[in-house]
Amino acid sequence: MAALSGGTVLQVVYTWRGENVVRIISARRVNRYPQKNTTVRYSLGAIKRKAARGASKTRSNAPEAPAIGEEFWKRARVVMPSGKTSVHLRVDSDVFEWFKRLGEGHLTRMNAVLRSYVDAQKH
């Protein structure tokens, strides 16, 4: 979903937490350079049908986080995520299959391992 905030277009990722409750997962400024759209869009009806058949990844009994006080928001600052670069990468088949066997999000996990390595090398 895109939203306009103070003249800036934001991409907002959210999930429904109840009948009339929306949890915002992230909001980021839209890049003016076109990128491959990997966002999956569902209507509210489709989301409710997924939840009814148990296909939603959001647990209905997930605990709510404690309220964040005003003091937090006074010190909060906006941090824009660094961009990602799409690359063609050749890895050993067994390494790829191991990550893929862990389920959806295997490329994100592979990136996290590389990020950990880079961070460790910086120190």
Image: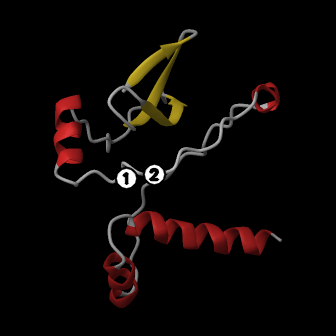
Q: Amino acid at mark 1?
A: Arg
Describe the element under mark 1 as helix, strand or loop.
loop
Relative to 115, is 27 above or below? Answer: above
Which residue: 48% across, 28% down? 30
| Residue at x 51%, y 66% (from the top left corner) | 111
Image disc number at residue 62: 2
Pick the quarter of the image with the C terminus.
bottom right
Q: Please, is residue 113 above or below residue 73 in the view?
A: below
Q: Nearer the viewer, residue 93 or 53?
A: 53
Q: CA distance from mark 2 to mark 1?
A: 5 Å
| Vertical comparison of 98 with 108: above or below | below
Task: Name the element at disc 2.
Answer: loop
Asked whether 39 or 103 is in front, the reply is: 103
Looking at the figure, which quarter contains the N terminus? top left
Q: Which disc number belongs to residue 59?
A: 1
Crowd around label 1: few <14 · some 14–19 · many ≥20 (10 Å): few
- In the displayed image of the protein, which residue is found farthest to the bottom? 94
Horizontal and vertical percent position of residue 62: 45, 51
* Residue at left offset 40%, top offset 81%: 91
Which of the 4 quarters of the picture holds residue 17? top left
Residue 46, located in which quarter of the rendered image?
top left
x 23%, y 30%: residue: 44
Residue type marked 2: Ala
Left or right of 89, for residue 55: left
The answer to whether the residues at label 2 and label 1 have Cβ atoms under 8 Å apart is yes
Q: Nearer the viewer, residue 3 or 75?
A: 75
Residue density around tag 2, few if under 14, some if 14–19, many if 20 or more, within 10 Å: few
| Residue 68 drawn at (x, y percent) | 70, 35
